Amino acid sequence: MSQPERKKSKEKKPLKIEIRLSGSGGQGMILAGVILAEAAAIYEGKNAVQTQSYGPEARGGASKSEVIISDTEILYPKTSRLDYLLALNQVSCDKYARDLKDNGLLIVDQDAVEHLPIVKVVSLPLVRTAREEVGKAVTTNIVSLGALVGLSGVVSREALRKAVLSRVPKGTEKLNLKALKLGFKLADEHQDKVTEL
Amino acid sequence: MSQPERKKSKEKKPLKIEIRLSGSGGQGMILAGVILAEAAAIYEGKNAVQTQSYGPEARGGASKSEVIISDTEILYPKTSRLDYLLALNQVSCDKYARDLKDNGLLIVDQDAVEHLPIVKVVSLPLVRTAREEVGKAVTTNIVSLGALVGLSGVVSREALRKAVLSRVPKGTEKLNLKALKLGFKLADEHQDKVTEL
């Protein structure tokens, strides 16, 4: 089939809502998906597709159903990034929470889901430190390595120092050691400023 | 090669740390990955692999480097779930933050990354409401649909009501309408309790 020509710049982005309903077998997630899709398609005149998977994830008591609702034709029936995720158990929450869009809504069962997905974050002036304190923006990578290793301890600071010295161009050792130290310093100053997201 | 026999139950889970360094081209992410891997492998005697991608994501100025550090042999050189993610620009942060493990650490540049990834969450007593207030745990799916639609408005409550009535087994309409109303009520009561994660 030939594609119609698209005037991308003039096209309004169509509404498309992606929803996943997940729980244990027997919790009726598939019927719930069917009902939601029919509410949209039959009673509101929108386009809707409902799918469920019978792959490995359907075994072990897990149950998953997906619904896409759109005001235009739905060309691909599988979800990509979820607007809404219902998770009735911990396994579903752990497995699918990362599929949510930025600003997507996670709805969990209060009793079954005790642990919510958490990412820790720390925001550091890496580029600025390289540019203003080391004096060379090109040392951002070394400042960053210092900060990463300082915060994480994935390798020792001394091992990192040796590796930096052996790899940076001859003549830039002093500059890069300065960058590394400033990275360690950023880590030390921000160790308590790691927040949960 | 034949695989050595494994006594899974007795094996201690080996240390394996997965790190992604991401930024713009010219920020030296690949050299940073090489240095970090060498710090681990040459100066600390661990196993380390470093990879970078030259696929579509390497174009457009983006630069990405990955390092896996382990105390045992690394059988697969690509990262799966990140322990650490360095993101020096917004695009990298948006794209890769979801690859972090639960409790993984996201390190961002303070000036370049203004928007951190956010998921909204609401925790509702869905199963409990079905079991205790409707009196049938099997109506959890309908309570959940009521809560989802009540919170999201992806379809109207009336459209959902009609779709529920047309799909549930004959004789269970009253029970399921009760479940639906209790789901709407949960949504109304928790509309202000959606929190950011």
Image (cartoon, coloured by chain):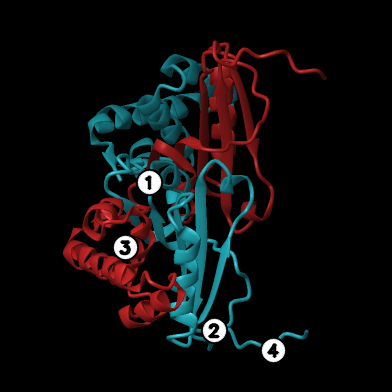
Chain colours: A red, B cyan
Which residue does the numbered mark 2 point to in the structure image?
A: B72
How many angstroms separate mark 1 from mark 2 (CA)?
39 Å
What's the residue type where badge 3 is placed? Val
How many angstroms separate mark 4 from mark 1 (CA)?
43 Å
What's the residue type where badge 4 is placed? Pro
How many angstroms separate mark 4 from mark 3 (CA)?
42 Å
Residue B89 locus on image (x, y percent): 39, 45
The label on residue A109 is 1
Q: Residue at x 59, y 16 (%)?
A: A8
Q: Could you tell me if the residues under marks 1 and 3 are in contact, i.e. CB atoms within 8 Å?
A: no
In the image, taking residue B194 as reference, residue A109 lies left or right, namely right
How many angstroms separate mark 1 from mark 3 (CA)?
43 Å
A94, B118: nearer the viewer: B118
Which residue does the numbered mark 3 point to in the structure image?
A: A143
SS label for mark 3: helix
Q: Residue at x 67, y 30 (%)?
A: A76
How many angstroms separate mark 2 from mark 3 (CA)?
29 Å
SS label for mark 4: loop
Q: Nearer the viewer, mark 4 or mark 3?
A: 3
SS label for mark 1: strand
Which quadrant of the structure image shows residue B133? top left
Which of the two labelled residues, at mark 1 and mark 3, occupies the earlier sequence position? 1
Q: What chain does mark 1 sit on?
A: A
Q: Nearer the viewer, mark 2 or mark 4?
A: 2
